[in-house]
Amino acid sequence: MEPLRGDETTVGETTVVARGCRLDDAPVRAVLETDARPRFFWAAGTESIAARGSAATVTADGQSRFDDVRTALEALFDDCSVSEDLPSVARPRAFGGFAFHNGTYKKENSRWDGFPSAAFFLPEIQVTKRDDDAWLTTVATGPEAAAEAETLLEEWRDRLVADPETEPGTPPGISHQKRTPTQGGWREQVAAATESIDRGDLQKVVLAQSLSATLDAELSVPDVMARLSETYPDCYRFMLSPDSGGTFFGATPERLVSVRGRTVRTEALAGSTGRGDTPAEDEWLAAELLDSEKDRHEQKLVADAIRDQLEPFASTVRIGDRTVRRLATVQHLRTSITAELDDDEHVLSLVEALHPTPAVGGLPPDVALQTIRETEAFDRGWYAAPVGWVDAAGNGTFAVGIRSAVATEQEATLFAGAGIVADSDPDREWDEVQLKYRPILDELE
């Protein structure tokens, strides 16, 4: 496992150097179970990434936050010279995401303290596994960056070999739960939203709830991520611990966008039902979902909006057939969407164009966002917002941060929402939200 030559980049007076080597295995826990921050975990399909420490950090706020992050990351990656021996899968990536709303949080001492409006970091240590291949990548900056990156590579290569993966522990347990709003308050919120829809002010709005849980023992997020990966292998599993504050994590079924070259992939995910206790009941529930006029209408609004948002960038946009996406506790209507771009576009340009989709925001977007701000009694923070990665070519993948929670040692706050349209029933929507808590709640209880 000889170190490979990496890349060297000069951004202003800062030299950025990366080194990499192949590993026999990729023990995630050794990377995540450290005091170093920030930390990031990402798993999708056959790829998983664990990263820690920051060689460079980018934050932004205000109306231009997407542009500002993109410009800073392009400068960071600019003129990278990467050895042919370092494959694309092992090259440095920037990891991070955005808050759902632009601007500061409305509550003091928010559970989202430490999470800026936008934040990305280029990690010092990046361990990547794809299929049966595993890689270690180290990054350093400054005048001695080359030597420091080599030293990091040697230290962490030895550390990872000596620290194999271990089995996750048991969930911490929950001693107390509090839902915001109450079921009575939820009925009032849904009634107000449907009245607005009846007046023609809205077509759809996604209202969210929060569930605050006091834990019996200290939470190990790496353990939670390991268990989520076993239960939800087809979802995007993510975890971000910023420089300070809690940890945001989840297992989301919804991809916001992937960009590779000029090919864009995304999807419309909306409409929900539970899973059956038997295969026959499961099929019946899926058929009922496919036949539901309310759910098909809600899902079509999302698909049409995504198509409209992509068309200014694309030469072609292809909408797939409506199918049922089955997860461990819930089923959704799903439509795959693929586009071919007219020109090269940075993934963050597409993230900005698509966020928030009507699956987590509503229509018209501005009215829906204002309704959410005025209605919800808590900060969404990074819930339902873009989280993912960017590489030097401007490619990347971002998921929508749903089925998620933000947690400290013995406190966790879970989030889930439901799309409200003209004929939404408040009690049915309440039940749907409780289903959406289950992926995280099961791993805490």
Image (tube, rainbow, N blue to C red):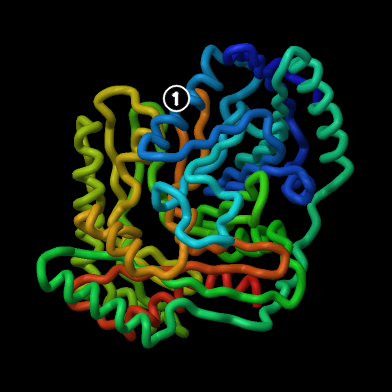
- Could you say which is closer to the camera, residue 276 or residue 292? 292
Identified at 26% across, 71% down, the residue is 420
- Could you say which is closer to the camera, residue 125 or residue 278? 125
Q: Secondary structure at mark 1?
A: helix
Measuring from the top left, give residue 88's x and y in whole percent.
57, 26
Measuring from the top left, give residue 20's x and y in whole percent.
71, 25
Identified at 50% across, 57% down, the residue is 235
Classify the position of the N terminus by image quarter. top right
- Could you say which is closer to the camera, residue 144 or residue 22? 144
Q: Residues within 10 Å of mark 1 (few under 14, many from 20)?
A: few
Measuring from the top left, give residue 347's x and y in whole percent.
40, 33
Identified at 20% across, 30% down, the residue is 315
Residue corresponding to mark 1: 71
Measuring from the top left, give residue 175's x and y in whole percent.
68, 83
Inspect this view and state whether residue 83 appears. Answer: no
Q: Label 1 sits on what residue type?
A: Thr
Q: Is residue 283 left or right of residue 156?
A: left
Inspect this view and state whether residue 98 appears. Answer: yes
Q: Name above or below for residue 78 compared with residue 71.
A: above
- Could you say which is closer to the camera, residue 15 or residue 135? 15
* Figure label count: 1
